[in-house]
Image (tube, rainbow, N blue to C red):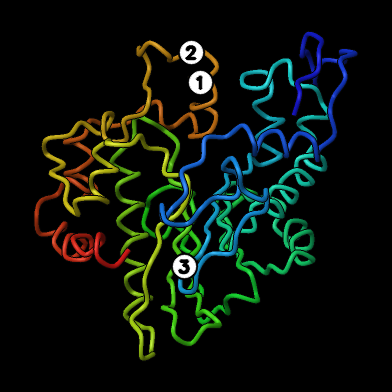
Amino acid sequence: GTQGGGDGGGRGGRGGRHRESVEDSVSRGVAAREWHPSPPSVVDAREPGTSGQVPVPPPGEYRVMSYNLLADSHAWKYRNELYRGIHDSILSWRRRLRGIVQEVKALRPDVLCLQECEDFHGIAAALAGCGYTGLHAPRAGGRTDGSSVFYRTSVFRCAAFEAVDFTDFDLRENAAAVACLVPADPNAKPVIVGCVHLLFNPRRGDRKLGQLRVLVERVEAMRGEYVGAVEPHAMLVGDFNAEPDSPLYRFIVDGTLDVSRVDRRDMSGCLVDGEDAGSLAATTAMDAATGSDEERWADWEDEDEAAGGVGDGDERMGDTEKIAVRLPDKY
């Protein structure tokens, strides 16, 4: 949306600039994005000379959309650090929900994966009229958001679902939603969808790796439990809080990661204190999001020895490596 004027103090500036409608904002935002159709053979309707309508994917192919919604509680809690100058009406969840629904209507995904999904029931009600139903994995520790998987009921039915709580693995209060979606087309492959929001803290790549390994293991377990004539494919979707070509990303691509050669602060490739873009706002938001106890971390080696962490040797890596090396073929 168009940002309002004013100084941004309190719950937003009260400037007099015109703010466009949600529909206009969404239309302008969708058109302004740089689109990379996948697979390349599918002509995207936003390309010049096309009809302007998103085409239906060919049989056996699906459109997938991933969206970090920015939980309403986070928007207001960290407003002064991250969203100064943004008018109240722009941050309003009611308006943002309207925009999200408009964008889903415009892009028409078959599978919609959401992170920081706080108003699950409100979103589910809003998307029901568009032909979607969803499943939710809430975060633990008193957090109010979570990860959700929605799907178009005319395309899929859900055969199994698991809400993964990473606190069960001593890996902080993040959550993942894992769903087995069976297509209406009997000749198409079922799909195991793993939607996750990994830990934000850029200095804890070890915990991000731990969460990612758990996600892969749970997705693979659901693939193994599926009973049917066609082996399910799988998708790992979400907000991984990692940069492309980071060690964490390479773990997914290559299936292995030698943690003895990677500092946990460099594992996700994200900014840490002291780097050129490490502003006060980013640092404050990180500390707020991860908890003050994260300021007093043990050294990698000490914590590894005490807790049996991800750097504990090849024996602990073995099972997940066997799964991960199959990612290029099955995911």
- Label 2: few (<14), some (14–19) or many (≥20) C-alpha neighbours in 10 Å: some
Callout 1: helix, strand or loop? helix
Residue nearest the viewer, comparing 43 with 130: 43
- Label 3: few (<14), some (14–19) or many (≥20) C-alpha neighbours in 10 Å: some
Which one is earlier in the sequence, the residue at label 1 or at label 3? Answer: 3
Where residue 141 appears, as percent x and y from the top left, is 55, 50
Callout 2: helix, strand or loop? loop
Residue nearest the viewer, comparing 285 with 18: 18
> Residues under labels 3 and 2: Cα distance?
42 Å
Quarter that holds the C terminus: bottom left
Residue 279, numbered label: 2
The structure residue drawn at horizontal position 80% and vertical position 40%, both measured from the top left corner, is 23
Answer with the quarter of the image where residue 75 lies.
top right
Q: Which residue is mark 3?
A: 61
Residue nearest the viewer, comparing 1 with 87: 1
Q: Nearer the viewer, mark 1 or mark 3?
A: 3
Question: In the rendered image of this protein, does residue 229 appear above or below residue 85?
Answer: below
Where residue 235 appears, as percent x and y from the top left, is 40, 62
Residue type beneath disc 1: Ala
- Does the residue at mark 3 contact the one at mark 2 (Cβ under 8 Å)? no
Where residue 28 appears, as percent x and y from the top left, is 71, 33
The structure residue drawn at horizontal position 63% and vertical position 55%, both measured from the top left corner, is 54
The structure residue drawn at horizontal position 82% and vertical position 10%, both measured from the top left corner, is 6
Q: Which residue is mark 1?
A: 282
- Does the residue at mark 2 contact the one at mark 1 (Cβ under 8 Å)? yes
Question: In the rendered image of this protein, does residue 88 appear above or below residue 108?
Answer: above
> Residues under labels 1 and 3: Cα distance?
38 Å
Residue type beneath disc 3: Glu
Which one is earlier in the sequence, the residue at label 3 or at label 2? Answer: 3
Residue type beneath disc 2: Ser
Question: In the rendered image of this protein, does residue 263 appear above or below residue 40?
Answer: above
